[in-house]
Amino acid sequence: GVDIRTLRARTGAVTYDPGLANTAACRSAITYIDGKNSELLYRGYPISQLATNCTFPEVCYLLLYGELPNRGQKQQFSVDLTYHTLLHEDMKKFFEGFPASAHPMAILSSMISSLSAYYPETGERNEAELNTRRLLAKAKTIAAFAYKKSLGQPFVYPRNDLSYAANLLHMLFAVPSEPYEVLPVSEKALDMLLILHADHEQNCSTSTVRAVASSQANLYASISAGVNALWGPLHGGANQAVVEMLEQIHADGGHHQKYVDKAKDRDDPFRLMGFGHRVYKSYDPRAHIVKETCDRLLDDLGIDDPLLELARKLEETALRDDFFTERGLYPNVDFYSGVMYRALGIPTVMFPLMFALGRLPGWISHFRELREDAESRIWRPRQIYTGPHRREFVPIEQRP
Ligand code: ACO
C-alpha cells in the first residue's frame, strides 16, 4: 500500500539508469511506439496512413488536440498558420548580427527563444492557442531567413496562398525578380517528411522540452531548448551526418563493405550514421516510407543520385551481417531522408532545421500535455556520487 514516492523518501533508494533507457518519466497520450514490431501511432493512427492521407497541418492538429480536424477545423487551422507567418520587423535586425558562417540551427534556437521577448506569457485567455499557432507559423520563416542569411541573399517573405510545405520551399528558394514555381512533387515529398518527423514520444529533444517546461518556463524557452538538443549528431544532426558519411564513402571509392567492417570495429569510433535506435530494434517504420518515397521522388525529378545507390548497398551489406541484426541495428528515419532533402535542393546544413520544423508540433503537444498534467513535477533526477568523501579544507600555502 506504500506508493513509490513514499518508499523512496523512506529508504533513499534511487535507480541507476544511464540515459533513462528504462525509466518512464511521464504518462503521455500522444504517440505510441512498439519498437519490436515496427509500429508507430500518432494518437492511435498508424504513421503509414497519416503519411499517405494527411497534410502536415492536419497532423499538427491531430497531435495537438487528439483528433483529426473536420473540414471547417482544418480550413481554420491552415488559415491561422498562414496568418502568423510574418516576423516582427525588428527581429530581422537579429539576423544581421550573426556571422554569415553561423550554423542555421544556432540562429533558429536563438530566434525561437527571443520570441518570448515579443510574446511574453501574460495569462490572457487564448494565449496558449495563439502562441502555438505563432510558433508553428513563424519557425519556418525563421528557418528560411537563416538560410538566406547564410547565402547573403535578401529574405523572401511568406506567400499566404501557398501550403505550409510549399511556402517553406518558396521562402528557401525564390529569389527576387526571377519566377519560381514550387513543384507539386517536391511540395508533397516535403510535407510527408514533416509528417514522419512530427512526434516520437520521449526522444532526447522532447524530453528536453519537458524537462525545461517542468520548471514552468514559457513555451518559446522550452522549445528553443528542444532545438538545441536536436542539433547533436546522435539525434537531429544524424540526417546531415548520414549524407556527409555517404559523400565520404563515395569519394573513397564507394567500398560499402569496408565501412560496414569499420562500423563493427570496437576500436574504431566510426558508426554507420542513420543506423540504430534506442527504441526500434527492428526496421523503423518511417525508414520504410522514406525509402520508397525517395525512389519515387528521384524518378519524378529525373535525378540519378549515386548516394541513394550507395545507401541501399550499405543497408543490404549491414543487414546480412550478424553484428547488426543481433544488436537490432536497422536504418532509422534519417538513413534515407538526407538523400530526399538533397533531391529537393535543400543543402546539408539545413537538414536538422527540416527535422526541427517537423518535430515542432510534437514538442508543442508535449509542452501542453505537461502543463495540463496534475502529476507533473519539476524534473530533478538523482545521481550516484563518485567524488571524494568529506575532507578538510587546505589553505593555499599548504597545497602541493
Ligand atoms: N553503427 C555501428 N554500431 C552501432 C551503431 C551504429 N550506428 N549504433 C549502435 N551500435 C552498437 C553499439 O556499438 C553497441 O554495441 P555493443 O552492445 O557491442 O557495445 C550497440 O550497438 C548498442 O548501441 P548503443 O549506443 O548502446 O545504443 P543507444 O540506444 O544508446 O544509441 C543511437 C542509439 C544513438 C541511435 C545509436 O544507435 C547511434 O549512435 N546511431 C547512429 C546515429 C544515428 O543514426 N542517430 C539517429 C537516431 S534516430 C533520430 O534521432 C531520428
Image (tube, rainbow, N blue to C red):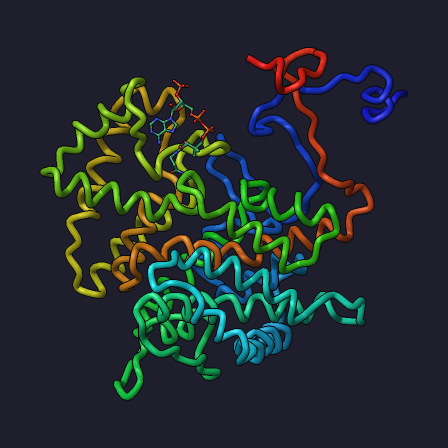
- Looking at this view, name the residue that lies furthest to the bottom: 177
Q: Position of residue 139 (x, y in %)?
A: 51, 66
107 lies left or right of 80: left
For ligand 1, give the image quadrant.
Answer: top left
134 lies left or right of 332: right
Q: Position of residue 287 (x, y in %)?
A: 37, 44
Dividing the picture into quarters, in which one does residue 200 lie? top right
Whether residue 102 is situated above or below residue 374 in the rendered picture: below
Residue at screen point 41% across, 66% down? 146
Dividing the picture into quarters, in which one does residue 271 lie? top left
Whether residue 208 is situated above or below residue 9 in the rendered picture: below
Residue at screen point 23% across, 28% down? 260
Look at the image and tell me whether residue 350 can be seen.
yes
Check the picture and name the quadrant holding the N terminus: top right
Q: Position of residue 16 (x, y in %)?
A: 64, 19
Look at the image and tell me whether residue 82 can be seen.
no
Foreground of the two, 153 or 369: 153
Foreground of the two, 51 or 239: 239
Residue at screen point 56% across, 51% down? 45
Whether residue 119 is situated above or below residue 373 in the rendered picture: below
Q: Position of residue 37 (x, y in %)?
A: 48, 33
Dividing the picture into quarters, in which one does residue 322 lie? top left
- Looking at this view, name the residue that lies furthest to the front: 397
